[in-house]
Image (cartoon, grey):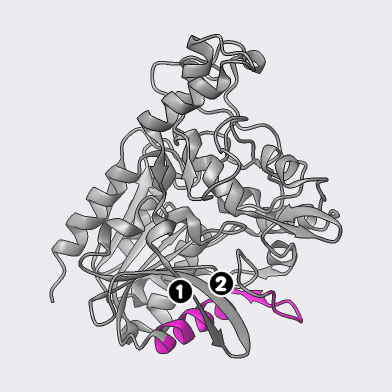
Amino acid sequence: LGGWSGRGRWGRAVHPGHRRGEWPGAEGQRGGEQRVALDDGEHQEGEREAAVDDVAAPRGGSREYFFHSSLSNLINESAATKQNLGEVVQVATMRSVRLWGCASARPRELVVRGLRLHLLEWGEPGRPALAFLHGGSAHAHWFDAVAPAFADRFHVVALDQRGHGLSAWPRPAAYATEDFAADLLGVLDGLGWERAVITGHSMGGHVAMAFAAWHPERVRALVVIDARPSIPEERLRRMQERARRPPRRHASREDAVAAFRLLPPETRADPALLAHLAEQGVAPRDGGWAYRFDPDTARVRRPADGWRLLDRIPAPALVVRGEWSPILPRDLAAEMVAKMPRARLVEIPGTYHHLVLDDPAAFVRALDQFLGELPS
């Protein structure tokens, strides 16, 4: 997943049946463009800001409540002015206000090898363990629309990996795959988990693959979400060069949220979910507002070569790719599955790299079926 340099390009949401740049009910927006947030893949680290719909997230009250994208359509349909906007918002609230999964989570911190790590926790201890790992420059809230679906049967956590979200930044900076994997081992120990299902998206999937090879006795099953086993050397070099640019500071929280952009630029995600991720991903820093990740996560990133590890993963494995993902082509995913002893491939129709955002319900169904087939 990519870093947030302030120099990314605008993302455009693409829905089936609409050409790029079009959006149902988007009349009156700049060029018909719906401004949304995207979670980057490994290939564009260090170059993203994300955009969010200007009216997607209300101010005041609980931050966990956000409006559905229909709010934008209601405003357009009603030709809302400042005088009647409140009435439109009230109608939209009754129709489509939602409570994101983090509202039911228990925030928790663990200290692992001297580093403070933050996580979101659902379900009761003692149940089968399920861990979610986000991608680069993202945070634990990436799984707010999927993790709670398993809380009735699993003890679930979504981890802010080192240097991301509310977790601490290691000093000196240390962002090798081995560092992320050692943190995960410490988290499992801290939670009292002997074994867990490890689920990771993009960079998180890369970490999950390495962990499953290095610590097979701790992995009940592995789920790799649109992630490659390795980053090509030239791509890694470009990523690190982009990350050396000075991080951008925004004058206000609103400015930082409005500038939130990701690459690759395609998504079908609900703008309300993307706005929620943007809101959760900014923090005051150095007299301005910035994104919740350490720029060194890209500058000194040292990914392991996962291709050499795949045949060392004995656990049942599910590789999930988005049908239209530019990050994990179908032939590459098939090659990964062929190298893992007990792996299979699932493709989520009509989704891109950010498939847990594009179609959370379809991902939940695929994961639920896989988990239901695991031996107890």
Q: Earlier in the sequence, mark 1 or mark 2?
A: 1
Please tell me whether residue 61 is drawn above or below residue 140 in the rendered image.
above
The residue depicted at 57 percent of the width and 20 percent of the height is: 85
- In the image, the segment drawn in magenta is 169-190
In what element is the residue under mark 2? loop
Residue type marked 2: Ala
Q: Are marks 1 and 2 in contact (CB under 8 Å)?
A: yes
Residue type marked 1: Ala
Please tell me whether residue 268 is drawn above or below residue 348 in the rendered image.
above
Q: Which residue is mark 2?
A: 304
Q: Is residue 189 highlighted in magenta?
A: yes
The chief SS type of the magenta part is helix
Percent x, y for residue 120?
A: 45, 68
Which sits in the foreground, 210 or 105?
Answer: 105
Q: Is residue 61 left or right of residue 143?
A: right
Percent x, y for residue 324?
A: 42, 35
Q: Can the viewer see residue 17 in this picture?
A: yes
Q: Is residue 79 highlighted in magenta?
A: no
**Residue 215 position by quadrant:** bottom left
Q: Which mark is residue 210?
A: 1
In what element is the residue under mark 1? helix
**Residue 243 position by quadrant:** bottom right
Which sits in the foreground, 361 or 355?
Answer: 361
Please tell me whether residue 209 is drawn above or below residue 29 in the rendered image.
below
Q: Which mark is residue 349?
A: none
Q: Image quadrant for the N terminus?
A: bottom right
Mark 1 is surrounded, within 10 Å at the Cα level, by few (under 14), some (14 to 19) or many (20 or more) other residues, namely many
Q: Is residue 115 left or right of residue 311?
A: right
Which sits in the foreground, 288 or 147?
Answer: 288
**Residue 310 position by quadrant:** bottom left
The residue depicted at 27 percent of the width and 49 percent of the height is: 346
